[in-house]
Amino acid sequence: MVTSRFKLAEAFAELTIHDSQFKKTLNRVHRSLKNLQQGFKEVARVARRMLMVGGVAFAGIVTQAAAFEQSMARVAALTGATTAELQQLTSAAREMGRTTIFTARQSASAMSAFALAGFDTNKILQSLKPTLDLAAAGQIDIGQAADIVAKIMAGMKIEASELGHTVDVLTKAFTSSQTNLLMLGDAMKFVGPVAKASGKEIEEVVSIIQVLSNVGI
């Protein structure tokens, strides 16, 4: 009888031990599942955030693309460009967007300014890069730079193929005298046609403006 009770107690103790271990195991599993669930929640939260950010970014890209296409449509209307010419202009604007500090849409705005000045497709393509360089150096709006360039080219009878040199002359002038690009462009607007008629070249005219600027005129 005593032996039976001892065996029963032993079995109960063993069962209790196993039950305790089972509970510990169960608790570990529960904690693991809880951590896993929390991990899934965190992944879902990050995924939602990424989708939201991606959605906003995608919407921004679509909006920019639409604005660019609209700008190029304006260029096409102003220039009367053929399909092939419009493709050239579009490629050039996108290339400037990749290789300069200006966007493709800003480049398209410069093209519109040139078109309003009467530039044809070939002249626009030749004038675009030097004008962007001038706008960057002078830290002014690209439309203003295009307007200055167009007026100087018209007043001084400068060809588009010569514009790179002209931009170098202008840049050196406003970076080494008491004037800026807007003031220089304004002066050239009035002086340029008269100077050209009297046989003056761009270098000489700009030098005179530099001297006058340095003495406050």
Image (cartoon, helix red, strand yellow):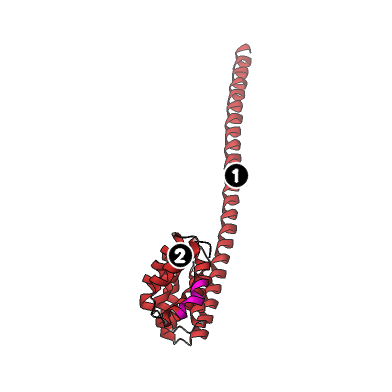
Look at the magenta stretch and give its main secondary structure: helix
Residue 43's place in the image compared with 194, above or below, is above
- Badge 2 marks a residue whose secondary structure is helix
Residue name at image x 50 percent, y 61 percent: 215
Q: Is residue 154 left or right of residue 17?
A: left
Q: Name the residue under label 2.
A: 210
Q: In this view, does 48 lie to the left or right of 210?
A: right
Q: Mark 1 points at which residue?
A: 37
Q: Specify the segment rendered in magenta.
A: 187-194
Q: How many numbered discs?
A: 2
Residue 185: x percent and y percent?
50, 71
- Residue type highlighted by circle 1: Gln
- Badge 1 marks a residue whose secondary structure is helix
Residue 39's place in the image compared with 126, above or below, is above
- Closer to the camera in the image, 158 or 44: 158
- Residue type highlighted by circle 2: Gln
- Closer to the camera in the image, 100 or 117: 117
